Image: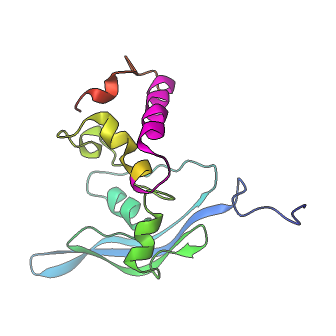
Amino acid sequence: MKSSGPGPREKGKDLLQIRNLHVEGFSDERWHPIVHGVDLTLKRGQVLGLIGESGAGKSTIGLAAMGYAKPGCRIMQGSVLFDGIDLLAVNEKGRRRLRGSRIAYVAQSAAASFNPAHRLLEQTVETAVAHGIAGREEANRSAVDLYRRLQLPEPETIGFRYP
């Protein structure tokens, strides 16, 4: 059977649309603007970088792109559409189902991305196993393959190290 038009996952289609995003943070007994009026569109297959000074709101925007605000922060206004789904209108349970399986946030520093109490391999496969994307053995094999493609030293054993 032939499709009559481009599929929803076709390269070049809008994957993420953020419109008029406003985020506030609470300190000194009141709410302060952190992000005000951000608009961006990420098309499927594109890479988007957020550049700015420390404290400019890059991480806040990245988390808001998943419909999430850190404790002490709140999304006050705007829309976040991921693959046509309004993440700010979906309940938390629905957002959790998407996180890790369809959308994820990777912190800008490796120190913030990896927990030093757990081995690299455990952390590499955690999301795939938790979301039923792969069993542990398959996820472990995929992780070693990823380490190889990234040309990390000793890809067969690097996952047993701590960050």
- Res 22 seen here: yes
Q: Is residue 67 left or right of residue 112?
A: right
Tell me residue 96's x, y (percent). Answer: 40, 68
Which scheme is used to colour this image of the protein? rainbow
Name above or below for residue 61 compared with residue 87. Answer: above
The answer to which image quadrant residue 66 occupies is: bottom left
Task: State the extent of the magenta-drawn residues as a range.
Answer: 130-149
Name above or below for residue 11 compared with residue 5. Answer: above
Q: Is residue 40 left or right of residue 160?
A: right
- Res 21 seen here: no
The residue at the point 43 percent across, 62 percent down is 99
From the image, which quarter does the N terminus lie in? bottom right
The answer to which image quadrant residue 34 occupies is: bottom left
Please name the predominant secondary structure of the magenta segment in the image: helix
Name above or below for residue 107 compared with residue 30. Answer: above
Please state which of residues 20 and 100 is positioned toward the viewer in this rendering: 100
The answer to which image quadrant residue 60 occupies is: bottom left
Q: How many marks?
A: 0
Tell me residue 162's x, y (percent). Answer: 22, 31
In the image, residue 55 lies in the stretch drawn in magenta? no
Tell me residue 87's x, y (percent). Answer: 47, 74
From the image, which quarter does the C terminus lie in? top left
Q: Residue furthest top?
A: 154
In the image, residue 135 lies in the stretch drawn in magenta? yes
The residue at the point 49 percent across, 47 percent down is 134
Tell me residue 158's x, y (percent). Answer: 33, 24
Q: Residue furthest left?
A: 28
